[in-house]
Amino acid sequence: MTQILFKNINMKDLHTMKVYEEQGGYQSLKKAFDQKPDEIIDAVKASGLRGRGGAGFPTGLKWSFLAKDVFPRYLCCNADESEPGTCKDRELLLKNPHMLIEGMILCSYACRIETGYIYMRGEFHDLSFIMDKAIEEAHAKGYLGKNIMGTGFNLEIYTHLGAGAYICGEESALLNSLEGGRGEPRMKPPFPAVEGLYAKPTVINNVETLCVVPYIVNEGAEKYASLGTEKSKGTKLVSVSGHVKKPGNYEVVMGTSTREIIYDLAGGIRDDNELKAFIPGGSSVPMLPASQVDVGYDYESLAAAGTMLGSGALIVIDNKANIVETTLRLISFYMHESCGKCTPCREGTRWLHQIVERILQHKGQLEYVNKLEDICDNMAFKTFCPLADACVSPVMSSIKHFRSEYEEYFKNTPVGSV
Amino acid sequence: MSDNEVTLTIDGKSVTVPKGTKVVDAAKQVDVDIPVFCYHEKIGPLGCCRMCLVEVEKMPKLMTACTMDVMPDMVVKTTTDKVEKAQKGVLEFTLLNHPLDCPVCDKGGECPLQDNTFKYGPPDTRMEFHRHNNAKATPLSPVITIDRERCIACQRCTAYSERIEQDRGLVMLNRGFHNEVGTFNNEPYDTRFSGNVIDICPVGALTNTDFRFKARTWDLTNAETLCANCGCNCNITMGTRLNELLRIEARPNDAVDDGWICDKGRWGHQFVHSKNKILTARENSAGGGKPTSFPTFPRDCTIEEAAGKVAEAFKKIAKEHGPESVGFIGSPYGTNEENYLYQKLFRQGLGSNNIDHKPYRDTPGLPIDHYGIEQIETANVVLLIASDPTEELPILDLRIKKAVTGCATRLVSLNDQKIVLDKYSTQSVQYKVGSEALAIDALANGLARELGEPAPTQDVGLEQTGISAEDMKALVETVRSSMKICVVYNPSALSGDAVLRVKRLLKLIAKVPTMECGAIPAAPATNAVGAMDMGLLPDFYPGGVSATDQEEIKKQWGEDTPTTNGLSALEMIARAESGELKALLVHRSNPVIDFPGGARVEKALRKLDLLVVHDMLETETTELAHLVLPSSGPGYDEGTTTNIGGRVQARKSALEATHAPDWKIISLMLNALGDETEYQKSLDVTDEIAKKVPGYQGINRRSMGKSGCTRESTTSTDETIAEQPTGSGEDGSLRLRVATFLFSHDKILDASSKLAHHFLSFTAHLNTEDAKRLAIKDGDTVLLSNEDVTLEATASISNRCQPGGVVVPRVSDWQGVNALIGTDGTLARVEVRKV
């Protein structure tokens, strides 16, 4: 299988400059500096690379949206990997920090940025030391700092640790947090490409996205675009978790079937149980029942199946698991992480939690399921940011596919037990 | 339709609005009501409450009307099933954990949550769990209490704190369901403008501690009146019940206050029920003055009788000793009507021009446009001269912040002390205390050089001002290159004839080609501009007519009116001391405390044969008076005042007084002196002002309406200015600057005031250089002295002024800081030493 990001991932001391350079690291810089910045943007556009953080927005297009002639501009690398089930960026930061730096240099050069930030979630405290060390090494080598490789191009990269809020992975909340403010999403427009960090044009990209860029510059956009499906190019890191024998991060070519990922790469279901359901793209996307396990793992196939690729976190649920309990666990995550800015999310997540909790106590009534659906309808797409939509996904999808499991809880409920 | 306008359709109605308008505001113009909680047109969009969801054609999901700019040909629908379901859903969420204590809630009856629920909400709730309980009464400050249970976390208040006050005093704490409005480290939220959050809170969460549970809102009688605490004249609503003032709210007027009031406006009117309120006319038998041979008031004397007797007494003295032996010190706090009638009384009735209202120099009118407060927003440069709006005219502070952060206005200042607004200025030029004349002239000379005009005065160099040549050059350049400049100067903080130099500077500014310019004379007193207009001046009749302009005066005011300049307030005090002034009438003024000189003023007033004080509260001066007349004052009185922007507005009575109003008392005195005008009501005087005072033509109740109207500014006459500004020798003493402090502990904010927590102790602000020389450390107790008095203060080495000066904020009446200044009002020099 083609490996781009994980090619040498387990090589000893890959995180050091010496080993990384031996493996061909930082070769892309010379190549890039021989080109005009816009040519790199065009290459990234041509490669079909889409943002790996969750929304899947075409990366090259995002770069070309920067407000013209407004400087300084900023690059923020979103390393606030908080989506439940996702742990791919962590592995890249831990084992291959230079790849990210190389990607950030390329992006900065292409977008004429002189300051980059790596916004890491607070729990990545230990990784920040690895990252800082790598930045230091890159400085010593002259890949960062003033007049990089004699081109007159300057770049500084800083790491910044968040304080552990899920919402700070949302790009505008990330900017607020980075500026020292409260981690709450901002109003859009203006979009970050026009007014982002410190009200200046800002590129915000996921770790994985930026790590792909050196490959595109080295090997050419066509080679990258030759991988994957029509609308989903290249490879994707998948974090497989849940009831599988070999949970972990796997790099797959876009379009690989989900069955292959679960049964071949991850070794199949634990204790050889039956697959019941899976959440393909992190806890924020709707779950799918086992019957759809052959769905292709790419943006368009998953969208057609009524879910999303998201951040690429495949959560596998076997038939020993209780779907209602699973749903409650997911709701409680979103209830805890709601920033509280807008009413439907702040109040709705808590209400959903109260209701599902009561169902689990066998104290509910049959109409609760309809009520859950209606509350979800009142929340979905009516909030400031997609956090409420994310909370609604598991509830709606679990009711859609496993309504009978909810109804089980009402069978023995005496009338008027509320 | 111009390029800057957009036409869209809302519920089938077409509307054209300026670009950048939010859909929710556009809807208002065609009477489509889109419900909101978090949106406030002055604060801007937040998108928190989600109440304003609407359907927009071609948009896949519902949009919030408060965050969305209008777009050409947009089709907005606010009454579709989808929208109605969303509104019901959002209201259900909002009410999910909101307590149903409307029957005891202060907001009940005027609550947007109640109103929106009735109009758009579900009839019932599907919530079957216990509502979340939270703290019911947590003080945010001594005057604001928050009911956290009622809070719907709309963030209006915190957005106000961030965007309007711009200091993030009030913030959201915690996250998700547990978020709450609070302050860093639980410190009190006690800014100058904190009270506005009570007005804007869409539920009963932020409550006025003073008003809490006192009355139901529908039982209040609301008077639409004006704040009387500074020269901005912000519009307020006084809510009273059973003749008791219960609360004050802002009454938005974009031309004045932009919808906000300061805390002194909100809680600083408690004096209306003060124990010190003067309610009857009385004779001070035990008063400090010497015994008088004039008729005394009988025990049950009516005010009408008393007024007549006062008039007779003054007439008698004027007859015996000549009209120059009587004088009048009026008030920049009185209404135009009171001021007008008093100057009429003294000029027509007694033939004296000994009329004044202030201890500093000023002349009426401006050589350039008199800008209204709202012009600050459209000016590209605002120049502050000797002005500290934050302490003196708080609402101006908010307006300047708004202009600087939102309208690309540049703020520059020429001041003798550091001020809070320096944070917003592109350049703050600081001159040494007392060198304002030199600094202003230097700016004028620099500007004249740039314009190729003759320099108005001899260049004396910048050394004495402590300003560097580069700084002055940059300031000159800013002024010269401005497109529209608004000069805000405070005449009461300018010593000597510096105010005339400011006017000379303004004339030069007017000569800059292609520039719009205007000025705001920003004296802090409520009706300082009105008092000047009404001719409470020894050298000007109403409307800025010079007292020596015989022809004009004889025509307007009759043959017997005086046409020589009278005595200024400070000169009257001096003549009282020398025995030349025999009788003085003081209206709503407290010279003993407010005028320079301290005990010497008191001594001078004791020498008078007759001192009559017409005031609303007992003061140090009423103690000296032989006769005291009651004045109604704000809350009770009716009349007009003119604010610093030249806007004339009506002040209405909210409470019923037990005695005759001031205008009645004065008109009785006028009648006793032979004037035959019968005024039936205050408005009759307003009408007479409209006839007699240049600039006030056409100003009447109708033209003023609810939000006032602008009076025409008169052109100032050119005054001769002493050629060489007085320099000063260096003798080791420091030059004193008495600075204004908003929450000064005085008669208005007495010890029982709700704002007592703002009171400060006596502090002297020194420069590091002087402190080093005098071996004074921060926090040391120091003595400030001149030949007469020695006062104790705490030193603060804050570099608030340049070396050679000391800034003392006037923090209370009892501090007696004016005693450090000579009675002639000139520059004070004080010795500062460590105890």
Image (tube, coloured by chain):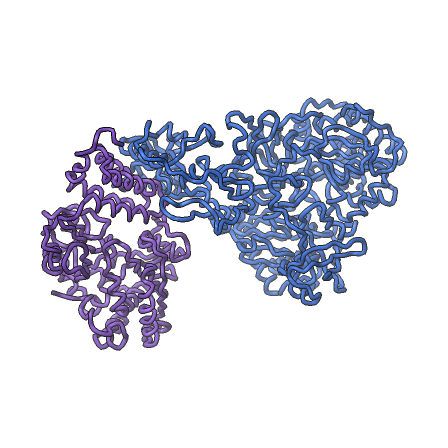
Q: Is residue B445 visible?
A: no
Question: Residue B469, image x and y in percent?
Answer: 62, 65
Is the residue B633 above or below the residue A166 in the image?
above
Tell me what hue chain A is rendered in.
purple
Q: How many marks?
A: 0
Q: Give how far across and how far down residue B546 sits, in percent.
A: 74, 40
Left or right: residue A242 versus residue B26 is left
Task: Return the x and y of residue B45 as percentages of the image width and height.
Answer: 40, 43
Among the chains pictured, the one given blue colouring is B
Q: Nearer the viewer, residue B92 or B145?
A: B145
Q: What residue appears at the point 25 percent right and 68 percent down from the top-left corner? A: A95
Left or right: B798 with respect to B311? Answer: left
Residue B250: % across, % down? 53, 36
- Viewer-proximal residue, B452 or A383? A383
**Which of the 4 image quarters holds residue B707?**
top right
Horizontal side of residue B127 vs B28, given as left or right = left
Picture layout, residue B259 above or below residue B516 = above
Residue B132 shows in this picture = yes
- The quarter of the image holding the N terminus of chain A is bottom left
Of residue B770 and residue B780, the one placed in the foreground of this image is B780
Eyeballing the image, is B35 above or below A187?
A: above
The residue drawn where x is 30% and y is 60% is A79
Image quarter of the C terminus of chain A:
top left
